[in-house]
């Protein structure tokens, strides 16, 4: 437990300070930085800010769920998924910088709220915990697919990042189901979607 707490605290500091480094190469790194109108660039940056905030939330969720998970194998699965999500965090942070914009000013709030939600999901039991991960990743997959349609056609670099993120989220969701995740009640799914909608709307602007 102490080791998990230390790792979780270190993850929180790195996540919120922006001190993250991807273990995998950035998708689309070899693509040229295309010219965009100022409006298109602002829109692309706002979408990537939303995606970056989503990865901040993912770090908090996985840290919390690993903290309260009972099964050591499940803890290990959460840790592996969190490492890949850290790549996403670094990739979206780099795209924000390249687009000349910043991360959400409310990231500490998003992190704290997501951590609390992750603890609550974990306390419901490992199978419910895994079910929460599966549903989260399913909704994130839908969100990223929508962003692929909303990103400017010229911004191939951001589209490459979002595409790889989506592939990873699909795999994480499948992992959670294979490990024994159970479907969540419909009201819980709706509440999760409503909370995500609020986060997306606010992070797009702030």
Image (cartoon, rainbow, N blue to C red):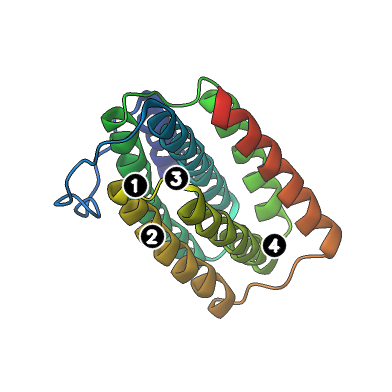
Instruction: Locate residue 202: give its quadrant.
Output: top right
- Secondary structure beneath disc 1? helix
Q: Residue at x 28, y 48 (%)?
A: 157
- What separation in Å lies between label 3 and label 1 (alpha carbons)? 33 Å
- What separation in Å lies between label 1 and label 4 (alpha carbons)? 37 Å
Does residue 136 appear to the left or right of 182 in the view shown?
left
Instruction: Single out the mark in the foreground, 3 or 1.
Output: 1
- What separation in Å lies between label 2 and label 3 (alpha carbons)? 31 Å
Name the residue carrying label 4.
125
Q: Residue at x 66, y 38 (%)?
A: 116
Q: Nearer the viewer, residue 204 or 114?
A: 204
Q: Residue at x 55, y 76 (%)?
A: 179
Could you tell me residue 191's position as x and y percent? 79, 49
Instruction: Single out the mark in the foreground, 2 or 3.
Output: 2
Could you tell me residue 178's position as x and y percent? 54, 79
Q: Nearer the viewer, residue 206 or 112?
A: 206
Does residue 14 appear to the left or right of 32 in the view shown?
right
Dot placed on the residue nearer the N-terminal end, 2 or 3: 3
Q: Nearer the viewer, residue 16 or 3?
A: 16
Residue furthest toward the front? 37
Tell me the number on the disc at residue 158: 1
Dot placed on the residue nearer the N-terminal end, 2 or 1: 1
Name the residue carrying label 2.
163
Instruction: Locate residue 124: give its quadrant.
Output: bottom right
């Amino acid at each position: 437990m102490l080791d998990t707490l230390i790792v979780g605290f270190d993850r929180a500091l790195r996540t919120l300070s922006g001190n993250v480094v991807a273990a995998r190469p950035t998708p689309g790194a070899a693509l040229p930085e295309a010219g965009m109108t100022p409006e298109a660039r602002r829109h692309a940056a706002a979408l990537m800010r939303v995606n970056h905030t989503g990865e901040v939330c993912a770090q908090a969720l996985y840290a919390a769920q690993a903290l309260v998970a009972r099964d050591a194998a499940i803890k290990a699965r959460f840790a592996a998924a969190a490492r890949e999500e850290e790549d996403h965090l670094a990739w979206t942070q780099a795209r924000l910088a390249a687009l000349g914009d910043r991360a959400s000013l409310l990231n500490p709030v998003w992190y704290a709220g997501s951590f609390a939600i992750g603890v609550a999901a974990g306390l419901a039991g490992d199978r419910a915990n895994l079910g929460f991960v599966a549903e989260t990743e399913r909704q994130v997959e839908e969100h990223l697919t929508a962003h692929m349609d909303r990103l400017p056609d010229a911004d191939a670099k951001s589209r490459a990042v979002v595409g790889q993120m989506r592939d990873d989220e699909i795999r994480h969701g499948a992992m959670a189901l294979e490990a024994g995740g159970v479907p969540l009640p419909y009201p819980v799914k709706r509440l999760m979607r409503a909370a995500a909608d609020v986060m997306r709307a606010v992070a797009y602007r702030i």
